[in-house]
Image (cartoon, rainbow, N blue to C red):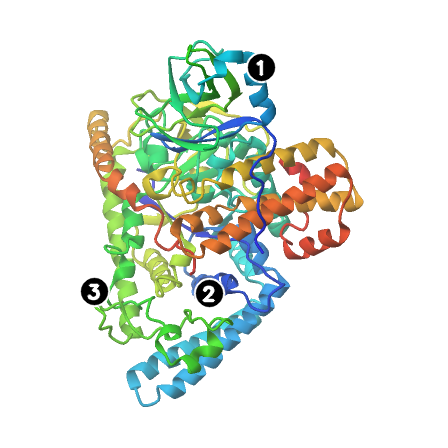
Amino acid sequence: MSSPTRGYLCLVLHCHLPYVRHPEHETFLEENWLYEAISDTYIPLLRVMDGLVHDGIDFRLTMTLSPPLISMLRDPLLISRFERHINKLIELAGKETDRTRFQPELHRVAEMYLDRFVQTRHAFTQQYRYDLVGGFERLQEQGKLEIITCGATHGFLPLLNVVPSAVRGQLRTAVAHYEETFQRPPHGIWLPECGYFPGLDETLRDVGLQFFFTESHGLLYAEPRPRYGLHAPVFCPTGVAAFARDMESSKQVWSAEEGYPGDPAYRDYYRDVGWDLDYDYVKPYIQATGQRMNTGIKYYRITGKTDNKQVYNRAWALERTADHAANFIFNRERQAEWLAPGMDRPPVVVAPYDAELFGHWWFEGPEWIDNLFRKLHGSSHLVEAITPAEYLERHEVNQVCTPCGSSWGANGYHEVWLNGSNDWIYRHLHIASRRMEELTSRFGQADGVILRALKQAGRELVLAQSSDWAFIMKTGTMVDYAVKRTKDHVHRFTRLYEQLLSGNLDFGWLKEIEDKDNIFTNLDYRNFS
Amino acid sequence: MTPQLPDHYGRTEAVLLIVHPLLLFAYWEATPESCRQAHETMGPEMDGARVVLRMYDITLIHFDGTNAHHVFDINVGLEARGWYLPLWTPEKSYCADLGFLARTGRFHTIARSNIIHTPRTMPSGRTDEQWMRVRFERRRKPVGRALEFVAAPGSGGQISAEEQHSQRERLQEDIAASLGEYLAGGIPSSNQGFA
């Protein structure tokens, strides 16, 4: 070995939320997904990374910012609503410090929340000046963070591919949006739900993407069998590289039972004051309808499999993040030592997670990442953090294989997004995709209101294609919302299609849906040809 | 108000989708015009005819309508409009005809589906190797990148090629052993939405 590095760690965080924005309502429950993710995950991650840079700690992280997420983070209405959200939390936390003043254990936790929310507001308004995307972009420019793209709206490509122009539309729109946002092309992509099918790499190559990720069996079952299994990428016949998820490191972090987030010291997600406290007291902080919901203030630690939860102890929980980071590195070092002798290069361990695991579900997750990179920088000489781009620069020669069709959903294929709860959507999605392609050939050139209608048709199509709706239908919570979103967008698309063909555009209604479904301002409708 | 979507689009078609390597989902629509044509063509033979999905195994062939490896029919009924189709072997290519099957055995196709290729469920038996050098383009779109085939790299130099080979075999076996349980876990529990 010419390099002292025995192994690479490629940590990938997938940041995506479906496009949820309802200007027609003063408050909207599902918009909270974004507000909670901003305060629990995105701002804490940014602060961890900026803290590392500040302290001179070198690190490498790869992160998806999906186009809907970027669009929401830059939307003035949602930005102002997040500010309202964090102000309400500060107000509630203030009341909580007062309410708990004679209960020292709880009081300490209430003060932690108050302090945290105030800091979050300060970070949002002062440090990042309402522009979190800009915060991530600076880290990318500093060479620490690799921001990759995703499908335009996280469409599950293996099931859209019945109409190949739908896949092209998702990918071209995503890449164009990335270029518009960051003034440079993306190097790689997180395929929505890790959904790959053989041949997809041709479209990836055509839009200029150089790597993607698959679930483990995407490479383990590749043809021919890859010499290095999961621990080196392969080139598809098109020259696009495929990296596969490592099973061991995945399990260690996200498994609810065996994984770190289940440690008794960590904060319990489920016990929330929105459910626990007197109704009249929490009423201003729950749903406008008066239904209870999570507020984000949670006093207890996981404790164990018991209803008798102990009060959260922040210092103790933070100590555990250091232990768990050390344990993760220890395991990666052993893995590298075991794998390296059989390879002509350091093995790479690809560890991808949903970003919202860190901070939202696993409250201490961002601190775990902080500890991980500090320890890697300080004491581990065996494992080096790397991005896929750096790997491919260092290792230009890779084996040629065709990965196997796969996803990271339960059982590894398509059943999460195609089953009795959601199979009805595909008939509508496919016909709409065909019709969009037809519109691109009928309207080779367009301007004025026709152009606006064509662009809006493209927006409605991609919004209908979000895999999130099928996923929610399968999981069984908030199903009505997912059904409504699917039907609304297909219906709006169909009406636009019919109006474009008949030449009778309803201008007033077009303006209305342009304001509602305002993603991809500069969408090129010819992306769907 | 949630709008109602159309029951019919006025388009005769049959579509196959992959659920997993051993399960397909098919949906279809047949316009009244297609059914009328079927009646016209089949004449009295339509009496008692069943609606079936005729499945063709067309793995690794250029299908001309007659050369399938294997053909089987699944009774469906037009009104169902969607059906789950269990299979017994992964890694196959299929297409399907939706049509009327007369008691006489005569078959009239209403619509031919797309072609699907079901995924593999185990490591490939092929172990031949091809290696390629591809230049990574930083901050630029790779346009017409040269793909240069090169010799397979040698061993890492620490252990013999034979030892490497047997280590890799062990590794693959270890991984294969734990893969089933792992995959059943599915995507991270965090991806449960924010509800």
Considering only vertical position in the picture, is A478 above or below B91?
Answer: below
Please provide percent x and percent y for residue A351.
35, 48
Which dot, 3 or 2, sits closer to the camera?
A: 3
Give the quarter of the figure containing the N terminus of chain B. bottom right
Q: Are marks 3 and 2 in contact (CB under 8 Å)?
A: no
Same-chain check, marks 3 and 1: no
Same-chain check, marks 3 and 2: yes
> How many C-alpha atoms fall within 10 Å of the one at disc 2: few (<14), some, or many (≥20)?
many
Indicate the secondary structure of the residue bearing disc 3.
loop
Chain to which mark 1 belongs:
B
Seen at 57% across and 35% down, the residue is B8
How far apart marks 3 and 2 lie (CA) works out to 26 Å
Q: Quadrant of residue B121?
A: top left
* Residue annotated with mark 2: A36
Q: Quadrant of residue A41?
A: bottom left
Q: Nearer the viewer, residue A396 or A71?
A: A71
Q: Are marks 1 and 2 in contact (CB under 8 Å)?
A: no
> How many C-alpha atoms fall within 10 Å of the one at disc 3: few (<14), some, or many (≥20)?
few
* Residue annotated with mark 1: B40
Please provide percent x and percent y for residue B172.
24, 33
Seen at 56% across and 12% down, the residue is B41
Q: Residue furthest right?
A: A448
Please provide percent x and percent y for residue A525.
68, 40
Q: Identity of the amino acid at label 1?
A: Glu
Which dot, 1 or 2, sits closer to the camera?
A: 1
Indicate the secondary structure of the residue bearing disc 2.
helix
Q: Residue furthest bottom?
A: A102
Q: How many marks?
A: 3
How far apart marks 3 and 1 lie (CA) works out to 69 Å
Considering only vertical position in the picture, is B130 above or below A43?
Answer: above
Q: Which mark is residue A305?
A: 3
Chain to which mark 2 belongs:
A
